[in-house]
């Protein structure tokens, strides 16, 4: 089947299936289960209205249960088990966690993840806020925003390939296609450097890729928040003699503090799950291992499903408090 025809067919079946589900489920509810006629019409209408929201939510709840809840519990089970020949498993308690905690590679991955958490959300949010403020002050600000946001349209693997070429190293007698080495040699460097093997600088070079991607996301959200700051507060500050820096840091930033926190925590979740960039650029070598890549190595290279699942649970435990806190703040904002 031609891919284009397959895509159109998938869309048609998906959309048609959704429309058909909602239409026929309503018919079943209103005409068969709780008909709106007869002596019990009022009671039936009330019952149908109670059930209808759950009827509409059922596909989403079923998908969440199948693709989110079930994998979590199955991963927890695997993390407490050991695989045996014949596709069997044996309960081993916390042995997989003890083995994981005894491996230096795990602690290297955890340390690097913490380093990413300190650097990437802070730089992405700061650059995004700076870009949002400056782009609103020039005529061609929308064009600038488009270029800054463009990396968000690139997959993490695509961005990793681009930046791997930026850091590329060729022998001294060949022309350098890597921008970093070309600039380094132009300003008097002795010989090209294999940047991705330089410890600990290589970890920061990988972080630059994610900062480059996430700055556009932060800029868009924070730009919308800055435009929502009441003009009266800005005008009052200017009348009182505040300079542009004071207006920005003492008037605008405090009023969008909640949005900054949301952007920060959202990028933090992305950082905790970072995998593609490290996998495509260094594969965790030269002390650049992170938790998600460590999990991949254990699950699919070492075929150690127990330790791999245990590392997946560690990632989930690190992400969960941030998710809960984000949901709490979102509900608080809506009240």
Image (cartoon, rainbow, N blue to C red):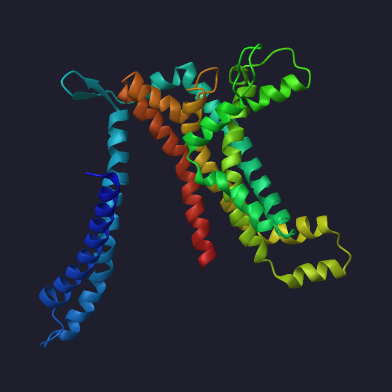
* Quadrant position of the N terminus in the picture: top left
Residue 36, horizontal then vertical, whole percent: 16, 83
Query: In the shown orientation, is residue 81 left or right of residue 139?
Result: left
Residue furthest to the bottom: 39
Query: In the shown orientation, is residue 73 left or right of residue 183?
Result: left
The residue positioned 53% from the left and 36% from the top of the image is 159
Give the quadrant of residue 312.
Answer: top left
**Of 163 and 203, the residue lying toward us:** 163
**Of 223 and 172, the residue lying toward us:** 172
The residue positioned 68% from the left and 66% from the top of the image is 229
Picture layout, residue 47 above or below residue 313: below
Query: In the shown orientation, is residue 241 left or right of residue 202?
Result: right
Residue 98, horizontal then vertical, whole percent: 39, 21
Residue 192, horizontal then vertical, whole percent: 67, 15
Residue 64, horizontal then vertical, whole percent: 31, 50
Picture layout, residue 280 above or below residue 272: above
Report whether residue 275 is seen: no
The residue positioned 58% from the left and 49% from the top of the image is 149
**Of 283 and 82, the residue lying toward us:** 283
Query: In the shown orientation, is residue 154 left or right of residue 93?
Result: right
């Amino acid at each position: 089947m031609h891919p284009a025809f397959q895509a159109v067919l998938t869309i048609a079946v998906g959309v048609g299936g959704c429309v058909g589900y909602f239409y026929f489920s309503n018919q079943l509810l209103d005409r068969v289960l709780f008909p709106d006629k007869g002596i019990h019409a009022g009671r039936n209408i009330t019952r149908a209205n109670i059930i209808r929201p759950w009827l509409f939510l059922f596909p989403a709840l079923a998908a969440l249960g199948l693709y989110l809840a079930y994998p979590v519990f199955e991963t927890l089970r695997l993390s407490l088990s050991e695989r045996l020949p014949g596709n069997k498993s044996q309960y081993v308690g916390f042995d997989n966690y003890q083995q994981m905690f005894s491996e230096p590679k795990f602690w290297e991955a955890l340390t690097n993840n913490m380093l990413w958490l300190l650097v990437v959300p802070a730089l992405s949010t700061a650059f995004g806020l700076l870009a949002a403020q400056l782009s609103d002050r020039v005529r061609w600000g929308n064009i600038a925003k488009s270029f800054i946001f463009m990396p968000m349209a690139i997959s993490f693997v695509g961005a990793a390939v681009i930046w791997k070429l930026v850091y590329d190293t060729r022998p001294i007698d060949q022309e350098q296609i890597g921008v970093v080495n070309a600039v380094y040699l132009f300003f008097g460097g002795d010989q090209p450097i294999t940047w991705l093997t330089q410890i600990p600088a290589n970890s920061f070079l990988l972080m630059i890729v994610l900062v480059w991607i996430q700055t556009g996301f932060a800029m868009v959200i924070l730009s919308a928040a800055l435009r929502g700051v009441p003009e009266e507060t800005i005008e009052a500050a200017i009348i009182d003699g505040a300079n542009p820096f004071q207006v920005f840091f003492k008037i605008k930033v405090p009023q969008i503090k909640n949005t900054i926190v949301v952007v920060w925590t959202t990028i933090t979740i992305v950082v905790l799950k970072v995998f593609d960039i490290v996998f495509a650029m260094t594969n965790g070598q030269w002390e650049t291992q992170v938790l998600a890549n460590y999990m991949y190595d254990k699950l699919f290279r070492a075929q150690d499903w127990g330790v791999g699942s245990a590392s997946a649970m560690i990632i989930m435990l690190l992400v969960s408090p941030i998710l809960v806190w984000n949901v709490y703040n979102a509900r608080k904002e809506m009240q």
